[in-house]
Image (cartoon, rainbow, N blue to C red):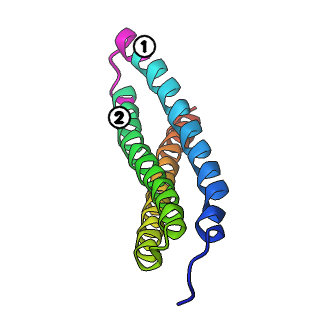
Amino acid sequence: METLTLTTPALLFSAISLIMLAYTNRFLAYASVIRNLHDKYLEKKNDSLLRQIQNLKKRLQLTKWMQIFGISSLLLCVLTMFLIYVDEDIFAAYIFGLALILLILSLALLIKEIHISNQALQHHIADIEEYLTKK
């Protein structure tokens, strides 16, 4: 294995920053939808609204862990750069490997969250199609 340089972990900064921005946008969108569904649920206790809220709760949990793993990856990249700076190359390589694993976990959770989101939208489409066939 080649020795890590300061530029290797620094390359992930922009990628992780963009991922974190996307995760934050997802989180804010979920928060808005949950608030709206909450208000609707208080007006009309509908099972469909309750299922949507439960689905969003699951997706919110996934988004939280995506953010935690992404931020941890970024922190470990910074620690890697510090370890390279103080000539702890072997330790830096292991920390950088851990940072990559955390980033992989974050992205894997994103795939899971996208799958759940897609299923939720499919239920909405099925509801609409059912309504249209009854007309």
Crowding at dot 2, Cα within 10 Å, few <14 / some 14-19 / many 20+, comes out as few
| Disc 2 target residue | 51
Q: Secondary structure at mark 1?
A: helix
Q: Secondary structure at mark 2?
A: helix
User: Image height check: is 13 above or below 24?
Assistant: below
Taking depth in this image into account, of 125 and 112 the one nearest to the observer is: 112
The C terminus sits in image quarter: top right
Q: Which residues are magenta?
A: 40-48
Quarter of the image where one finds residue 91: bottom left
- Majority secondary structure of the magenta segment? helix
Which residue shows up at 66% across the image and 64% down it? 11
Identify the image quadrant of residue 85.
Answer: bottom right
- Establish if 129 lies above or below 94: above
Q: Position of residue 64 (x, y in %)?
A: 40, 43
Measured from the top left, where is residue 84 in percent x and y?
52, 70
Whether residue 40 is visible, yes or no, is: yes
Instruction: Tell me the kind of residue under disc 1.
Output: Asp
The amino acid type of the residue labelled 2 equals Arg
* Observer-nearest of 19 and 26: 19
State the residue in front, 86 or 77: 86
